[in-house]
Amino acid sequence: MHFPISIVTSLIAISAQHQTIMPRHWVVREQAIVHELTTHSRSLSAEQASLTAQAICHEAYVRGYDPLLFLAVIHVESHYDHLAISPSGAEGLMQLMPATASWAADQYALPWLVVDSFDPVTNVQIGMHYLIELHRRFGNLDITLTAYNRGPTATARIMKEFGELPESLLNAYSNKVLRQYQQLVTTYGSLLQNTQ
């Protein structure tokens, strides 16, 4: 994918709007995420896409994660639809169950009302905090992603029973996210490398 040089050069001004000033290559990641969201989302406005990208990049930068990983989770979970509701009741971009979102918001002192599931910025902030907490708990990214999808209690039970995650579970979710992550890195990689 080719981006006009004007996108890259205009990013310095955008970075000044952040409370945390991010290095230029992080600002370029933000623009890549805005591009991905505006290209593929049927529900986000341009402003919502921009604010959501800012939130993803800010949270990822502060916590030391690649924001494209969280974008891959969003792609697999909701296909960038901030109004998505799963058959099991998970809501928003990161498909949070309302009880999990409420618990996570309390744990991380984040503002939360039940209607916030569909606010894309709030949804990704809570979802990212929750996913990072699962990563701290489980350590391994495959297990973390499975816990995000199946729930930490069910995942711990599976790990106790089998000693590891069965291949069928990895193929069901974790591998989908990691393949999407790799696709995003491939798609935006040259743009990101040119700014480091």
Image (cartoon, helix red, strand yellow):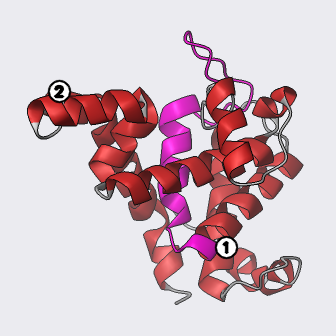
- The crowding category of the residue bearing disc 2, from other C-alpha atoms within 10 Å (few below 14, some 14 to 19, many at least 20), is few
Q: Which residue is mark 2?
A: 168
Boundaries of the magenta span: 62-90
Q: Which residue is mark 1?
A: 4
Residue 83 in magenta stretch: yes
The answer to whether one can see residue 41 in this image is no
Element on which disc 2 rests: helix
Give the answer, above or below, for where 135 lies relative to 169: below
- Amino acid type at mark 2: Ser
Give the residue at the far top of this rendering.
87
Report the number of numbered marks: 2
Towards the viewer: 6 or 31: 31
Indicate which label's residue lies in the foreground, 1 or 2: 2
Residue 147 in the image: state x and y as whole percent. 38, 38
Residue 133 in the image: state x and y as whole percent. 50, 54
Q: Is residue 180 left or right of residue 11?
A: left
The answer to whether one can see residue 123 in this image is yes
Towards the viewer: 105 or 46: 105
